[in-house]
Image (cartoon, rainbow, N blue to C red):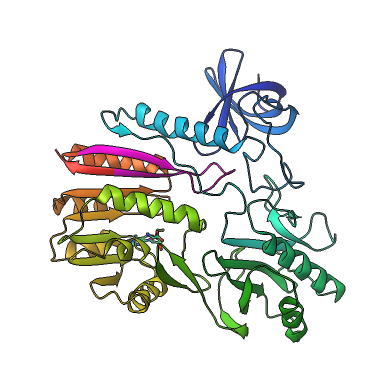
């Protein structure tokens, strides 16, 4: 086996993060993507004595595990990697992959709970960020997801199974509308054109929809016809917010340089476990509402009795977890980096009539050491890269009776857990929670107490 060889492999196993491996010529060949049992063709990228890396070119034979119905975009769209596996099978594999990471890190002696399934396996997403583009040079405009493994080509995903029918209807109607008027999409190489991204958000429990068309400022068409068209669609939910974000930034990401409200308000509401949350166009909110209700309930259970307790909600976003835990607590203090989210969190407490929560803007790694309160319970819910060593070191100094760690990346979770363990915390409970069916992602909730 040498670099650039095209070889056939059978996938032996899967690893966390959407990776898999095969064995060839007594070597472990690591792959991106792949499902146990698939026969694939691959191109060798690196070949060392005992290890190799290859990229999958195509599936020659499906895995016997792949028995689930898929959407017409499956294989082409870079969105759902495991759609062809029955949902229970995906969850079982994720549970195995998460606990294998614990085992490899030598963390044991905790109560290992089975993975919790997402309340809905399909149509569970409350937010999608689509991209306008094409599939071939000067080809027709597409609106959807990046093609698997490609950074330029776009696949129109109008029959997506992880969003509600409303999303697919709005996407199709939007694409048709702009195509019929000959309004061009933005070309990210030439930085020319108009239509860039398209974001739909939905309050699952309120039935409110937000549509956000992200464009350059190179054209300035009258969008009132577009608004009328959207409002005339036959939908299950209500469009209460139609926005036009102007983004001339050269990077291939949504950046709001100007926000124009074309219809209704600039926000929607969502309800979670009986509390109301205002969601602004760019603030973080868990993308699976029913799953989030489950996740937050588990976190609340792990945190235990909150009566008379002081609680820190670190990486607090719009303040969901802190407010959910606040009912019986004496005091909740949240820290969050994004100012807009902090404002939303504080506004949400007023909306919910909660008076014992305060959310502060700043980096946990800097702000937490400045807090003078003595917390009984600390909840941490950091982004994928986990908490920094410094932040964990600061958290340890408070000597909280309980630490509830909610993680969206078990790899960085384990690094943080090892540091907490070293400092005398014991990992009591671990529970994987699947919030993202058909993708390789998985949340994990842990409870730690001082030894
Ligand atoms: N707990 C919230 C948000 C979790 S997502 C919820 O369940 O909705 C992680 C959050 O951490 C994001 O809102 C992100 O903006 C914030 N964040 C990222 N780095 C941070 C840092 N260094 N300090 C504080 N907050 C940070």
Identify the image quadrant of the C terminus: top left
In the figure, residue 258 lies in which quadrant? bottom right
Residue 69 x/y as whole percent:
71, 39
The verdict on residue 449 being magenta is no
Is residue 116 positioned above or below 99 on the image? below
Please name the residue shown 14% across and 62% down the image. Answer: 308
Depth order, front residue of 80/393: 80
On the rendered structure, is 387 left or right of 18? Answer: left
Q: Quadrant of residue 330?
A: bottom left
The stretch in magenta equals: 426-446
- Relative to residue 151, is residue 311 drawn left or right? left
Between residue 16 and residue 158, name the one nearer to us. 158
Residue 65 appears in the figure = yes
Q: Is residue 49 above or below residue 364?
A: above
Point 69% across, 60% down: residue: 165
Q: Which quadrant is home to the N terminus?
A: top right
The correct choice, above or below, for 324 with respect to 259 in the image is above
Residue depicted at x 28% and y 28%: 108
Can you tell me which quadrant of the image ligand 1 is in? bottom left
């Amino acid at each position: 086996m040498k670099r650039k060889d095209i070889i056939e492999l059978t996938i032996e196993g899967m690893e966390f993060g959407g990776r898999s491996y095969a064995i060839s010529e007594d070597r472990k060949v690591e792959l991106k993507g792949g499902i146990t049992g698939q026969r694939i063709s691959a191109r060798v990228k690196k070949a060392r004595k005992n290890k190799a890396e290859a990229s999958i070119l195509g599936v020659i034979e499906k895995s016997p595990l792949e028995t689930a119905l898929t959407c017409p975009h499956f294989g082409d769209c870079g969105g759902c990697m495991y759609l062809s596996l029955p949902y229970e099978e995906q969850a079982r594999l994720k549970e195995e992959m998460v606990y294998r990471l614990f085992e490899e890190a030598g963390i044991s002696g905790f109560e290992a709970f089975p993975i919790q399934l997402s309340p809905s396996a399909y149509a569970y997403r409350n937010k999608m960020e689509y991209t306008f583009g094409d599939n071939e040079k000067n080809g027709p405009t597409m609106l959807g997801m990046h093609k698997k493994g490609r950074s330029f080509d776009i696949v129109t995903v109008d029959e997506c199974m992880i969003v509600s029918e409303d999303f697919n209807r709005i996407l199709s109607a939007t694409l048709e509308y702009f195509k019929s008027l000959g309004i061009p999409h933005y070309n990210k190489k030439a930085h020319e054109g108009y239509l860039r991204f398209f974001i739909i958000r939905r309050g699952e429990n309120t039935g409110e929809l937000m549509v956000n068309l992200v464009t350059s400022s190179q054209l300035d068409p009258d969008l009132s016809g577009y608004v009328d068209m959207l409002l005339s669609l036959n939908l299950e939910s209500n469009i209460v917010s139609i926005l036009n974000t102007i983004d001339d930034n050269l990077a291939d990401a949504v950046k709001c340089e100007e926000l124009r409200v074309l219809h209704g308000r600039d926000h929607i509401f969502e309800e979670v476990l009986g509390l109301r949350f205002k969601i602004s166009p760019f603030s973080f909110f868990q993308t699976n509402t029913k799953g989030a209700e489950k996740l937050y309930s588990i976190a609340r259970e792990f945190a235990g009795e909150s009566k008379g307790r002081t609680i820190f909600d670190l990486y607090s976003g719009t303040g969901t977890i802190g407010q959910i835990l606040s009912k019986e607590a004496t005091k909740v203090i949240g820290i969050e980096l994004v100012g807009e989210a902090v404002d939303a969190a504080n506004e949400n407490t007023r909306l919910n009539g909660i008076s014992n929560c305060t959310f502060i803007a700043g980096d946990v790694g800097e702000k937490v050491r400045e807090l003078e309160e003595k917390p009984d319970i600390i909840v941490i819910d950091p982004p994928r890269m986990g908490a920094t060593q410094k932040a964990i070191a600061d958290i340890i100094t408070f000597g909280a009776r309980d630490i509830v760690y909610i993680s969206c990346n078990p790899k960085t979770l384990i690094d943080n857990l090892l540091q907490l363990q070293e400092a005398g915390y014991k990992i009591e409970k671990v529970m994987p929670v699947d919030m993202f069916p058909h993708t390789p992602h998985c949340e994990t909730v842990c409870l730690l107490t001082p030894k």
